[in-house]
Image (tube, coloured by chain):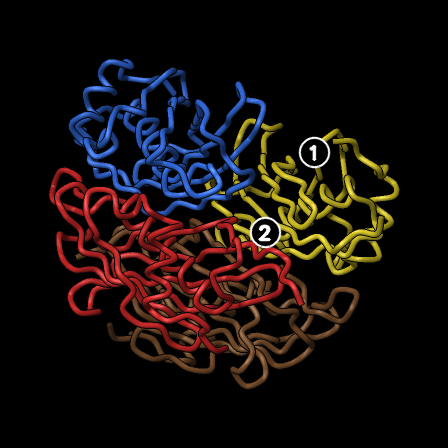
Chain colours: A blue, B red, C brown, D yellow
Amino acid sequence: MQPVMTIDELHRFLDTDFPQIHTGGRVFSVSTIQPGSVSMRFDPNERHLRPGGTVSGPALFTLADVTAYAAVLAHIGPVALAVTTSLNINFLRLPKLRPTTCTCKILKLGKRLAVIEASIFQENGEELIAHATATYSIPPREM
Amino acid sequence: MQPVMTIDELHRFLDTDFPQIHTGGRVFSVSTIQPGSVSMRFDPNERHLRPGGTVSGPALFTLADVTAYAAVLAHIGPVALAVTTSLNINFLRLPKLRPTTCTCKILKLGKRLAVIEASIFQENGEELIAHATATYSIPPREM
Amino acid sequence: MQPVMTIDELHRFLDTDFPQIHTGGRVFSVSTIQPGSVSMRFDPNERHLRPGGTVSGPALFTLADVTAYAAVLAHIGPVALAVTTSLNINFLRLPKLRPTTCTCKILKLGKRLAVIEASIFQENGEELIAHATATYSIPPREM
Amino acid sequence: MQPVMTIDELHRFLDTDFPQIHTGGRVFSVSTIQPGSVSMRFDPNERHLRPGGTVSGPALFTLADVTAYAAVLAHIGPVALAVTTSLNINFLRLPKLRPTTCTCKILKLGKRLAVIEASIFQENGEELIAHATATYSIPPREM
């Protein structure tokens, strides 16, 4: 399973396709692309917090969804119009206002469906904050 | 299963606890509270759109999470510090830039866990756009 | 959304396609087929119990999966080779050794994917025991 | 996170607590226990098959649930009365009538909830057949 996009190409695609993730400032960036996986970095700020100083669930959902989507595109190319069909997320520990990493692993890349596992970490990868599994529908590809 | 909060009380609580849902303008409001269920209305705008003019997945996740949370609080009161522990969402149809309703039904309200079903509709309730199941951890309550 | 199979036809199909659900005695039977939904009855016996006298999780999973599958087939016909792609189940209350009903509602019946909601009840439909959401992949249909 | 049970102790507990997994012959056995994880081996036979010769979804669900449960018990001890509260499973590839391994990793072992990731493999770990995430409710423990 070989990636077909570079970090720069993914950034350009996300800027066009997910501009709303940059609302209020750039907080998401692709950090690595490897065969079968993509990692993104998320730098939360005040607008992602809930009372008590923890990062909100919707912010983590967005991180998981964007990274999983990036992992699919990195392996099938930006022309495809993939759509999230389902996402299951478990919130494991209260996330702090700290740099956060999401690593997505492709469990299956079929002709019609891709299934991705997302692990969200803080503290240099030592604290698993949330874990998600997402499914994407892939449009028919030209031969 | 009787509600213990009014729509006004829920609005005040959400303003304090989920201020970020109002970033960029007020788009979420509680429309009904009934025994065992709460509905909210979501008026998406440009910043919730993806290319193609469909409302983004994270916007629907936020709607499901906030409404399910409101349903729990409406029945246990605003003092509780409930936390989302998991959320499973299925995206069923592409949502348009239209008024959107989320109706949450409490499937279980236990001492430690609440399980909520969320149905997201458009077109006056005729188009089911997304469906979610969420679990909330409820902190120990005083006697 | 109109059903295209009768209860007898569904029974014959399940006998062939899911013979293992009858291992140790017939405990599953279709009770109703309606536009967009199918209900099955499950009569658990000793071999479905865990210590404490509650019906096991795998038995409820099987009930949800078989009923959801029956709901899909009832609406697309028995020729199709649908496959479960994912199933999310919440166990809500401890199930007793009593007649159990699973009602499945079709949330979406697309060309490629069907999404089904399953509610498992006891006590004449008054106790919700478990709730599931399942996705089925539908093979390309002939025109 | 240190295990507190041996393979023999787990086998004895499962024989008592999950006798129905041995109905029709012993097909499940614990193969490894490590800090934070447990693996089980499943040797499917004719009664686990669906037409087409693939192992049924309920058989894989049972494998994931039993292994995840074993992983929790191996780390908290057999006295606890843990209960599955939810399980989300993705079926990725059609499983054949071959030796099958389920490896469960503890994502979180809290006071009240444990969250486990289950990966089901065939072909000596090279084919990922299914992937699940399960949540268990842990009863209050004595001090």
Q: Is residue D101 visible?
A: no
Which quadrant of the view contains residue C33?
Answer: bottom left
Residue for point 73% across, 48% down: D27
Q: Which residue is mark 1?
A: D37
Judged from the image, the secondary structure of the residue bearing numbered disc 1 is strand
User: In this rendering, would C53 be left or right of D105?
Assistant: right
Type of the residue with mark 1: Ser
Task: Report how far apart the C-alphas of labels 1 and 2 lie in the structure.
Answer: 18 Å
Q: Position of residue D34 (x, y in %)?
A: 75, 29
The crowd level at tag 2 (other Cα within 10 Å; few <14, some 14-19, many 20+) is many
Judged from the image, the secondary structure of the residue bearing numbered disc 2 is helix
Q: Is residue A59 visible?
A: yes
Question: Is the residue D7 above or below the residue B87 in the image?
Answer: above
Residue for point 34% across, 49% down: B61
The mark nearer the N terminus, 1 or 2, is 1
In terms of depth relative to the viewer, which is nearer, A36 or B136?
Answer: B136
The crowd level at tag 1 (other Cα within 10 Å; few <14, some 14-19, many 20+) is many
Q: In the rendered structure, the residue with mark 2 lies on which chain?
A: D
In terms of depth relative to the viewer, which is nearer, A27 or B123?
Answer: A27
Residue for point 50% across, 37% down: A131
Type of the residue with mark 2: Phe
Q: Position of residue C45 (x, y in %)?
A: 70, 75
Q: Position of residue A132 (x, y in %)?
A: 46, 39
Q: Which mark is residue D107?
A: none
Q: Which mark is residue D61?
A: 2
Which quadrant of the view contains residue A12?
Answer: top left
